[in-house]
Amino acid sequence: MSSDAILRVEHLTMRFGGLVAVHDLSFTAKKGEITALIGPNGAGKTTVFNCITGFYKPSEGRVALRHGDSAQWDQLESLTASSLRSRMHGDGALFLLERMPDYLVTQKARVARTFQNIRLFRGMTVLENLLVAQHNSLMVASGFTLFGVLGLPNYARAEHAAVDKAAMWLEKINLTDRADDPAGDLPYGAQRRLEIARAMCTDPVLLCLDEPAAGLNPRESAELNDLLLSIKNEIKTSVLLIEHDMSVVMQISDHVIVLDYGTKISDGTRDQVRNDPKVIAAYLGVDEDEVAKAEAEVGL
Amino acid sequence: MEIFVQQLINGITLGSIYGLIAIGYTMVFGIIGMVNFAHGDVFMVSAFVALIASLILTTWLGISSVFLSLLIVLICAMLITSLISWTIERLAYRPLRGSFRLAPLISAIGMSIFLMNFVQVAQGPRNKPIPPFFQNVIVVMEKDGYEVTLAYKQIVIWAVTAILLAAFWYLVSKTSLGRAQRACEQDQNMASLVGVDVDRTISVTFIIGAALAAVAGTLYLMYYGVVSFADGFVPGIKAFTAAVLGGIGSLPGALLGGLLIGLIETMWSAYFSIDYKDVAAFSILVVTLIFLPQGLLGRPEVEKV
């Protein structure tokens, strides 16, 4: 197992009654990379996400996350043997996500996620959506609003920093001129980008995106690609991605994992995966003219 | 005409008090979708807190400045009532969150009966008076010996309401806390996923609602000069009517609804029968629910996908 991993999923199994949604799945996501999780509908991709982000408690297996470089993966076994949820190592830490409730996964382990359907705060402005995501640091700085109401300078400074950060993201997603519009009024593609920016405003170490390109037109998915690449290259945040849009997956991901019926059928770079016969059979399929040729051969 | 102006003045005063209480109903409904039937009794309790505080101030400490004592009474009432409301939420509502929808509602009705009976036993069943103050009035207009008056008390009520509402508006729309509150109102799961502590935000909502009810309670006591254990019920239900009329969940709606209910009640008393003023106010509730269920400023119900 590579030592530069940020996330390690080991022998993950999720059962709902008699249905096995994910069976004995293991993979790693490397720090600073974009890792894509692909597969046909019902392959269990979203279930894996829900296990990572604390929405579901896995039936079996381990989901471990690492902060910083000093935390050594060889400490993982002793952490698992203890009853702790996390352990600090110098300026880094190890987390066992399957032991944490969802809000702690966000707050302490700093894993952010988006959903397949857009879940913005529609009635709030675009800017406010980005500020809510910085609520925690602002609450601490404002002495839980008490000092903020009194107008103490600390709070004003924190609020300024929060607005600056939001402005930086607005610029990145090209929504600066719509900052004061209600988020629900934005076009679909812009809402998708805003959702990613909001997740990034929580300062995550790992960003989990569930089908961010769903419903986007080709131009919008090209913009999404640029945004995700800049998150990877400039912000240095690791990304875990579920996606159906192969133009997104094949252009930006460093590492692709393919699921089918809840098990991993392929794992490697995008070229390895693209040429893997099992993946082609289960998911990618063949070109239409090849189908036509095959059909002609059997006389259809 | 003179009667109309006089009733307008009285109606706005009464409406301010209803509006302050209605905000508590509407905020709690907005964030956890529950009608907090104990809110009217929280208002009544706050009037008693104000009564006790003002008696202590005037008879024991001998503070003679009316404005200073009013300020201290207001702050005491707000703090103690907030604490009571926080406790109620913690003990009676939070454990039932995630239970079936009617459970917290029944718990709220129980809380309402508890508060009413507790005050009846602790303070006695009779009306409790405070020594009158702010007796002066301004004569606004006069015709044929009928004087339209604006009492100092009424000016104080208008001013306090306006200042408190401005502060409240700032809190909800400009601070981090207010943003978190609106986020929880729209999508609690998502709010917790971006790091908002939902339970704490709900507690704060109850505290703010109770603080505004405490302002209403103090002003009510000052205006009428008496309070009894049963005074939470009817004003509470009228404020609830106001919240429904304005559109439950909408903060400006609660204030508008409060003013309208206050005006309808006083106008009805002047031009029709004073005995039927409550009937008029509650008829509004029925008519609103039938013909305008989303209220005047409420959002129409949107199906969540």
Image (tube, coloured by chain):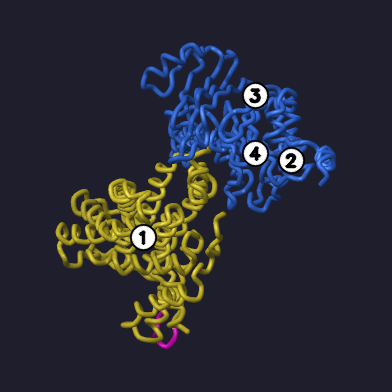
Chain colours: A blue, B yellow
Tag of residue A174: 2
Give neighbour class at mark 1: few <14, some 14-19, many 20+ (Cα, 10 Å).
many
User: Label 3 lies in what chain?
Assistant: A
Give the residue type at disc 3. Answer: Asp
Residue that mark 1 sits on: B216
The N terminus of chain A sits in image quarter:
top right
Alpha carbon distance from label 4 to label 2: 32 Å
Q: As displayed, is residue B208 above or below residue A296?
A: below
Which of the pair A260/A1 is nearer the observer?
A260
Dot 2 falls on a residue whose secondary structure is loop
Whether labels 1 and 4 belong to a single chain: the reply is no
Which residue is painted at 23% across and 62% down in the image? B130
Instruction: Give the percent coordinates (x, y) of residue A281.
Output: 70, 33
Alpha carbon distance from label 1 to label 4: 60 Å
First in residue order: circle 4 vs circle 2: 4
Q: Is residue A137 visible to us here?
A: no
Magenta span includes B145: yes
Residue that mark 3 sits on: A267
Give the residue type at disc 2. Answer: Asn
Magenta residues span B143-148
Residue that mark 4 sits on: A40
Dot 4 falls on a residue whose secondary structure is loop
Q: As displayed, is residue B140 above or below residue A224?
A: below
Give the residue type at disc 1. Answer: Ala
Give neighbour class at mark 4: few <14, some 14-19, many 20+ (Cα, 10 Å).
some
